[in-house]
Image (cartoon, coloured by chain):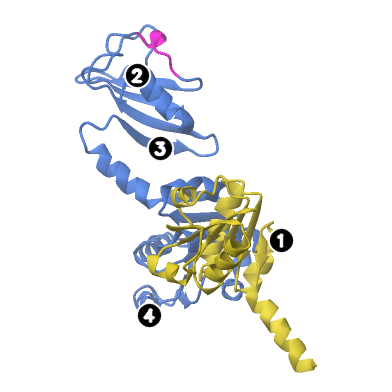
Amino acid sequence: MKKVVIMGCGRTGSWLANLLDAAGHSVTVMDVETYSFRRLLPDFKGKAVIGNGIEQEALKKAGIEQAEIFIAVTQGDNRNIMAAQIAKHIFNVPRVICRIYDPLRQEIYQTLGLETISPTTIFAEMLKKWVEE
Amino acid sequence: MYIIIVGGGGVGYYLAKALLEEGHEILILEQNRTLCETINDELGGICTRGDGCEVATLVQAGTSRADMFVAVTGEDQHNLVACQLAKHKFKVPRTIARIKIPKNAGLFKKLGIDITINGTDVILEHITESVPTHPLTHLMEIPGEGLEVVEIRLPAGSLSIGKAVKDLSLPAGSMLSLIIRKDQKPIIPVPTTVLMAGDQIIAVTSAESEAAIRAALKVK
């Protein structure tokens, strides 16, 4: 069982929260809008916390100090980057994962020591394979 | 100097204007077309439409030859990323970021941003300073040393009134440097100087010792 904080309860964040919760992990999901939490399944047993992940107080409320994994998946690349760096450098969360749509920014932050994922490059590679098959 | 400014809102506009008058070469990066056009109409063609967090835009702007890079958009996360790119990708020697959330200043420093300007703090200080009962005001920060100069006003009723400086338990590294008393010449405190009600004390302290120095002076 892992303690996971997810920032952003959009399609990806909520989907991931539901999956991890069903698998028995302790999940807290944050979002700036209550309305986003409608995406959580009715039997979601984790916590949903209102707050902006670039504010340290909000992260504390979400239990960042006990978290083993922090995942930043809001719509904004920069917001994810900033929150991930707060989690890593201020709260020393053991594992921090950050979604960055922009491939160039993703590459730079990867070299700066952040664990980053760019859905753009992954999906483009997949489509390229599919085209070439 | 070649200075790039990210954000063409109020702060960016007046900053550019002031720096142009000093004879610097200025480029503003702003995404909003209307803002961009206004700046170019009023200050000459110094504004390029683009995202200061996009590597391609920064390449086009000639960021690698910039002497200074200033990010003053209204959002902390944009200012952070723009400055980090300027610093790490384009090796700009001096990066300055405006921040809104006071607590994040430490993060920006840790991540290599040279200077942060905290608009919220500046405004708060100016307002709280005008509240007569406000006991501690930040006057300035000493860059690099983690020290700051503060002003403390001893309110009537403080338990340190009548005490000598040597009898206060000041935190290590903190120092009272000057005492300003009504209708008197400023006094440089010595260990035997006795504090009086209404004293305006200028002290040097580390940011962490701020609470301790207030406690030592029995100021709430």
Asked if marks 2 and 4 fall on the same chain, the answer is yes
Return the residue at label 1. A111
Residue A47, percent across and down? 48, 56
At label 1, which amino acid type do we have?
Answer: Thr
Which of the two residues, A24 or A119, is positioned nearer the viewer here? A24
Asked if marks 3 and 4 fall on the same chain, the answer is yes
Name the residue rendered at 48%, 47% in the picture.
A60
How far is disc 4 from disc 1 in space, using C-alphas?
Answer: 37 Å
Residue B99, percent across and down? 44, 54
**Helix, strand or loop for disc 4:** helix
Asked if marks 2 and 1 fall on the same chain, the answer is no
Return the residue at label 3. B140
Query: Chain B in the picture: what colour?
Result: blue
Label 2 or label 4, whichever comes before in sequence order: 4
Q: Quadrant of residue A119?
A: bottom right
**What range of the chain is rendered magenta?**
B164-170
Q: Which residue in the rendered view is the most extreme toward the top?
A: B192
Q: Which one of the lettered chains is coloured yellow?
A: A
Which of the two residues, A129 or B197, is positioned nearer the viewer here? A129
At label 4, which amino acid type do we have?
Answer: Glu
**Helix, strand or loop for disc 2:** loop
Asked if marks 2 and 3 fall on the same chain, the answer is yes
Q: Which residue in the rendered view is the most extreme toward the front?
A: A43
How far is disc 2 from disc 3 in space, using C-alphas?
Answer: 20 Å
Q: Quadrant of residue B212?
A: top left
Q: Is residue B91 at least partly visible in the picture?
A: no
Label 4 with label 1: CB-CB less than 8 Å: no
How far is disc 2 from disc 1 in space, using C-alphas?
Answer: 48 Å
Return the residue at label 2. B217
Q: Residues within 10 Å of mark 1 (few under 14, many from 20)?
A: few
Residue B202, percent across and down? 35, 26
